[in-house]
Image (tube, grey):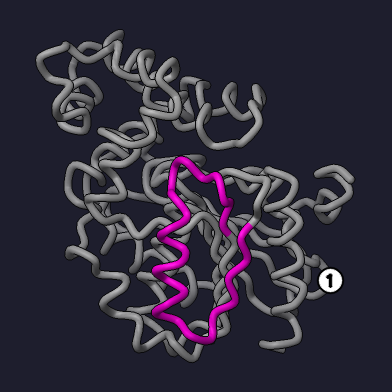
């Protein structure tokens, strides 16, 4: 079994859209699959990660109307790596603007990592618009969850990769890695900015899989991707993701009835598995699947298999 056999075949979009959501930002979005199928929104990670062609392949193209979009500042959305008017509240409202633009009454949301964060926040804000949720690599985006990966926690498992992550930061500033990186990533010094972006993004790419995956690391380290991801992630995490402490878990009541599939890697070092258990405890009807031979990435075989199974099973629950 391989990733190629687990995922649906490659497909091309049947339409692409440019949606101007304010005076600064224009979003790129596409639709593929069945125009009359069940609407399914792919919510990518990061924030700032963007989507790619492989992300179309988690869904049955004969049954789903698959919608993918690049969030503010990343992918094909413009302006690139822009932090102006780029907050969680803006992204939640962007999703709602996409829904209205496409004349969709209700839809399923599919999100991993930050995509799970944003999907949950949207669902809590607009529960009447959500048919179901497929969530991977749960990220509750609390200060403790961010500190685990960027200050103290994951560094103990990857001391060699951690050293390369902290290298761009002056030693006296390493007590606050988010703050120090924010200075670098918003600096006028382009060389320092690009070096920091690559180090930030490669740290995430290297730690996202249980087994080393050079293709993923190479993608994360590519300059265009790295600059948007590093700047936008750091901007969000410096500002506590623009949400209240523990906001997701304290506001689950409106979504308890929504069919929810949670898939999480047992060895996820980016978003440790406790977050999936904590969410599942608040959503008694949710189905939690732990992948015991996987880390964080949706491209790991066991996780990809469970994600496709989840989207297939959901067809019978929301159709």
Residue sitting nearer the eye, 124 or 225 = 124
The residue at 36%/39% (across/down) is 79
Q: Residue 156, image x and y in percent?
A: 37, 28
Residue sitting nearer the eye, 215 or 54 = 215
Residue 272, compared with residue 234, is above or below; it is below
Q: Would residue 29 be counted in the magenta stretch?
A: no
Would you say 67 lies left or right of 237 here? right
- How many numbered marks appear? 1
Q: Residues within 10 Å of mark 1 (few under 14, many from 20)?
A: some
Residue 156, compared with residue 51, is above or below; it is above
* Residue 120 placement: quadrant: bottom left
Residue sitting nearer the eye, 59 or 68 = 59
As helix, strand or loop, the secondary structure at mark 1 comes to: loop
Q: Residue 285, image x and y in percent?
A: 53, 86
The residue at 30%/11% (across/down) is 167
Q: Residue 225, image x and y in percent?
A: 48, 30
Residue sitting nearer the eye, 171 or 12 = 171
Looking at the figure, which quarter contains the C terminus? bottom right
Q: Residue 29, image x and y in percent?
A: 55, 55
The residue at 17%/11% (across/down) is 170
The residue sitting at the left extreme is: 172
Residue 176, compared with residue 294, is above or below; it is above
Q: Which residues are magenta?
A: 264-290
The residue at 68%/46% (across/down) is 293
The answer to whether residue 104 of the structure is visible from this angle is: no
Residue that carries the numbered disc 1 in the rendered image:
62
Would you say 52 lies left or right of 228 here? right
* Residue 289 placement: quadrant: bottom right
The residue sitting at the top extreme is: 191
The answer to whether residue 180 of the structure is visible from this angle is: yes
């Amino acid at each position: 079994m391989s990733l190629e056999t687990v995922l649906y075949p490659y497909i091309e979009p049947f339409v692409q859209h440019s949606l101007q959501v304010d005076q600064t930002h224009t979003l790129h979005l596409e639709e593929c699959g069945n125009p009359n199928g069940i609407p399914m929104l792919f919510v990518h990670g990061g924030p700032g990660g963007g989507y790619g062609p492989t992300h179309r392949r988690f869904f049955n193209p004969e049954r789903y109307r698959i919608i993918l979009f690049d969030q503010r500042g990343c992918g094909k959305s413009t302006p690139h790596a822009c932090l102006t008017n780029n907050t969680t509240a803006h992204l939640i409202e962007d999703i709602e603007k996409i829904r209205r633009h496409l004349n969709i009454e209700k839809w399923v949301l599919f999100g991993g990592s930050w995509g799970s964060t944003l999907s949950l926040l949207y669902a809590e804000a607009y529960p009447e618009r959500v048919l179901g949720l497929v969530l991977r690599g749960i990220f509750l985006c609390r200060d403790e969850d961010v500190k685990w990966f960027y200050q103290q926690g994951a560094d103990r498992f990857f001391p060699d990769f951690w050293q390369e992550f902290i290298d761009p930061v002056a030693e006296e500033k390493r007590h606050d890695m988010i703050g120090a990186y924010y200075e670098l990533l918003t600096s006028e010094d382009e060389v320092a900015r690009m070096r920091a972006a690559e180090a930030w993004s490669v740290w995430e790419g290297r730690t996202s899989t249980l087994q080393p995956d050079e293709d993923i690391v190479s993608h994360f380290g590519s300059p265009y991707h790295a600059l948007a991801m590093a700047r936008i992630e750091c901007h969000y995490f410096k500002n506590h993701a623009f949400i209240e402490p523990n906001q997701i878990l304290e506001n689950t009541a409106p979504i308890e009835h929504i069919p929810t599939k949670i898939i999480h890697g047992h060895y996820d070092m980016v978003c440790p598995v406790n977050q999936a258990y904590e969410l599942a405890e608040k959503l008694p009807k949710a189905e939690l699947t732990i992948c015991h031979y996987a880390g964080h990435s949706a491209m790991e075989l066991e996780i990809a298999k469970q994600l496709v199974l989840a989207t297939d099973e959901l067809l019978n629950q929301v159709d």
